[in-house]
Image: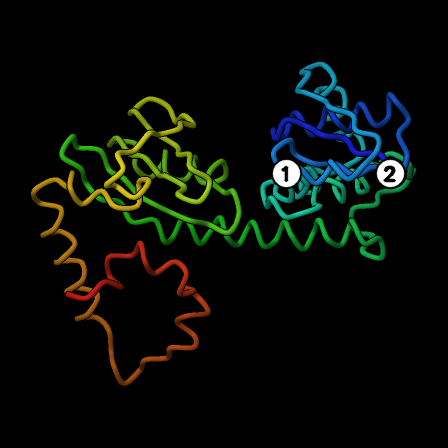
């Protein structure tokens, strides 16, 4: 078995695909550097990001796949699921090795898996766009915390840039410990060093703007007032808003 280890970026994965073809590797498993599973293999190939190699692979995929299939491939990578990079490689190898389109051939396990995973990531993207709750800090920054199942920050930045173009904001992924920051001009990916008492960015109540507590109380009161107890359907509510998201929603906190 041949292990190919890449640097954890999408372009790094594309470079790894190029190296698989260049070195004619067989029976390949692809891993991110930090995962460590590759230590069980006798043959390990390390690859970094090379723009030229990544570009050639992407250009080749554009000639074989539709925009939808290319998006699904990227969404699958954002899932961070164990073994997904290897399935993505098998998907690409199947695409390059076939004259006809393969993207709807769900009899191939990797084609089916990529499609299923991409749909889950897409659903998580929409949930995050709906469930983000900003909190105003003393320096007039609107701050939100999320812990999505998948790495969807790169997918939601355009939505929030368009919707909140007139204010500075940051959305922080507490699980992956990085965020996206909008400075009124552009959105950037950032890493943040928090003080210990902030629980790694999960509790910023100490730097709330003086009006923030009032705003949250008003929102909780409004949410309670529009709730009709006789029409309460907990099962349906949880289906649309799973409990794992509740801890960062002000309307779910007691008044």
Residue position for label 1? 35
- Are dots 1 and 2 in contact, CB under 8 Å? no
What distance separates the C-alpha of mark 1 from that of mark 2? 17 Å
Q: Nearer the viewer, residue 241 or 99?
A: 241
Of helix, strand and loop, which one carries label 2?
Answer: loop
Residue 18, picture quadrant: top right
Colour mode? rainbow
Name the residue: 15% across, 42% down: 206
Q: Which disc, if any, is residue 229?
A: none
Left or right, 182 with reference to 96: left
The quadrant of the picture occupied by the N terminus is top right
In the image, residue 47 above or below residue 75: above
The quadrant of the picture occupied by the C terminus is bottom left
Of helix, strand and loop, which one carries label 1?
Answer: loop
x, y percent for residue 217: 13, 58
Name the residue: 43% across, 77% down: 235
Left or right, 221 with reference to 203: left
Residue position for label 2? 1
In the image, residue 42 above or below residue 76: above
In the image, residue 115 above or below residue 78: below
Q: In the displayed image of the protein, which residue is found farthest to the bottom?
A: 230
x, y percent for residue 62: 74, 30
Q: Earlier in the sequence, mark 1 or mark 2?
A: 2
Q: Nearer the viewer, residue 3 or 79?
A: 3
């Amino acid at each position: 078995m041949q292990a190919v280890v890449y640097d954890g970026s999408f372009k790094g994965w594309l470079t790894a695909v190029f190296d698989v073809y260049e070195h004619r590797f067989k029976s390949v498993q692809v891993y991110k550097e930090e995962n460590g599973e590759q230590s069980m293999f006798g043959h390990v190939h390390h690859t970094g990001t090379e723009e030229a190699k990544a570009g050639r692979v992407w250009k080749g995929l554009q000639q074989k796949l539709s925009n939808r299939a290319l998006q699904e491939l990227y969404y699958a990578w954002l899932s961070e699921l164990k073994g997904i990079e290897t399935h993505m490689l098998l998907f690409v190898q199947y695409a390059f090795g076939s004259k006809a389109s393969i993207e709807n051939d769900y009899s191939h396990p990797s084609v089916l898996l990529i499609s299923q995973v991409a749909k889950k990531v897409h659903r998580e993207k929409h949930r995050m766009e709906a469930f983000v709750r900003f909190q105003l800090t003393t320096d007039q920054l609107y701050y939100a915390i999320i812990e999505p199942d998948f790495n969807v920050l790169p997918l939601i930045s355009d939505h929030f840039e368009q919707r909140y173009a007139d204010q500075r904001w940051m959305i922080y992924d507490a699980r992956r410990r990085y965020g996206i920051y909008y400075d009124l001009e552009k959105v950037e990916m950032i890493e943040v060093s928090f003080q210990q008492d902030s629980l790694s960015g999960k509790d910023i109540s100490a730097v709330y703007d003086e009006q923030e507590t009032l705003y949250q109380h008003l929102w909780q009161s409004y949410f309670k007032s529009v709730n009709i107890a006789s029409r309460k359907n907990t099962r349906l509510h949880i289906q649309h808003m799973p409990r794992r998201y509740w801890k960062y929603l002000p309307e779910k906190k007691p008044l």
